[in-house]
Amino acid sequence: MLKKLLSGAGVMALVAGGAQAQNLLFPVGEGDFNWESYSAFDEAVNLDGQGLTIFGPWRGEDQVLFESILAYFTAASGVNVSYSSSENYEQQIVIDTQAGSPPDVAILPQPGLIAELVRQGHVLPLGDEVQSWLGENYAAGESWVSLGTYDGPDGTPGLYAFPYKIDVKSLVWYVPENFEDAGYEVPTSMEDLKALTEQIVADGGTPWCIGLGSGGATGWPATDWVEDLMLRVAPPETYDAWVSHEIPFNDPAVIEAIEEFGWFAKNDAFVAGGSASVASTDFRDSPNGLFTSPPQCYLHHQASFIPSFFPEGTELGVDADFFYMPAYAERDLGTPVLGAGTLVMLTQETEAGRAFIEFLQTPIAHELWMAQSSFLTPLKTVNIDTYANTALRQQGQILLDATTFRFDASDLMPGAVGAGSFWTGMVDFVGGRSAADVAAAIDASWPQ
């Protein structure tokens, strides 16, 4: 219904319906936002007085940000929303659904948990129209349809979850001033990235800072490396088969991806402190070498959250920047992106819940969070100029340029592997074991 209204909306007069303007962070009609999409939704949906309960992972500052978006949904639809979260939200949603008292809408970042809730019949299908919308309106649309598709209670696959608020992991961080001083260019292919790595060594420098230390989770940063490289040495279908164990963990493609990581991490000349320091260096400390003088390293592979651990006062775009982890030019596998994110599900059948899913299909539901912080979207119809800063805009553009998006593999695998043997296996690998031996050991740990 909303799709038809949007296509015929034209230049619609901006109306705020039941808007409580005093609660809206950005005045309706002002700025570069796509207010036409808000007006069309406002005109189409009138559910005054209805209520909606939403349970999600966002707490603290993220909860404030999300509730600022919910204010516009309430203003346009008339639905009163109650949002809640929990420190142990994964366990809480399981308890609530099994007790027969779920929220109307649940938001989770764990596809594995979602798959289990869907299989148990606790989640409602979103329908073919939403599935078609995702395929047409999200960049690399079929990737997102696949991410939101799960086997229902009868084993029939369907779209059960709507991806909203995405994180990008395929990033390489660097210090622009160091690159400028050394005369280095940002590489645009994996071949160029490897050539740059070798050039830095030839110039007397050390290319990479890599740290896998993370307490009881030590090893996880290497899984991100391997997953990124898996998407660059094999098609996404192979990645999917790897995640679901349709191919063994020691499939040749997986071994190749691990060896690719080893090319960077197991060469003493390529890593600050030598390869022996990789496993013992805490991932939070590992980017520090970018900022020393002279630099201890020039490159650091990590997700979009890592600036939180940069030295205080670091200004992104000036003191530090990033580029897309490039793909091999010679392999013709497009521009894959590894990431994570949250998915929205209906756990009760309500008009207000269905309307909320329609609201998430409007550009305004994305732009209003884009303009604040910590929000990226693959929605092609948003105005990327509404991103709050250049770094977010560039990361958003990486999502829009993606030909394939795949969710973090270790988060999709059974916990014994994805949060267990995969982590320890990577520590063993950088410690000297071969990729084949490590992959075989991880495969043997896969739950039967």
Image: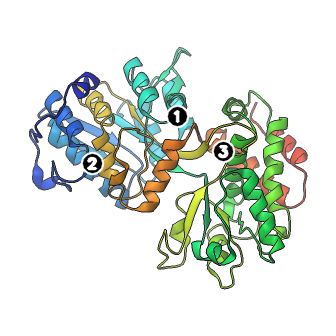
Secondary structure at badge 2 equals helix
How far separated are the C-alphas under marks 1 and 2? 25 Å
Residue 37 quadrant = top left
Sequence-wise first label, 1 or 2: 2
Q: Which mark is residue 140?
A: 1
Q: Is residue 277 in view?
A: no
Q: Residues within 10 Å of mark 1 (few under 14, many from 20)?
A: many
Sequence-wise first label, 2 or 3: 2
Sequence-wise first label, 3 or 1: 1
Pick the front one: 142 or 394: 394
Q: Can you give x and y, in whole percent of width and height, for residue 330 in the image?
A: 76, 41
Q: Residues within 10 Å of mark 2 (few under 14, many from 20)?
A: some
Which residue type does callout 3 highlight? Answer: Ser
Q: How many marks?
A: 3
Q: Can you give x and y, in whole percent of width and height, for residue 436 in the image?
A: 89, 44
Give the residue pinned by disc 3: 410
Position of the N terminus, as image quadrant, is top left
Which residue type does callout 2 highlight? Answer: Ile
Q: Are marks 1 and 2 in contact (CB under 8 Å)?
A: no
Residue, x 71% and y 63% (percent of image)? 212
Q: Can you give x and y, in whole percent of width and height, for residue 447 in the image?
A: 74, 34
Residue, x 81% and y 65% (percent of image)? 198
Q: Can you give x and y, in whole percent of width and height, for residue 213 in the image?
A: 70, 65
Which of the two marks, 3 or 1, is nearer to us in this view?
Answer: 1
Give the residue pinned by disc 2: 69
Residue 173 relative to residue 359: left or right: right
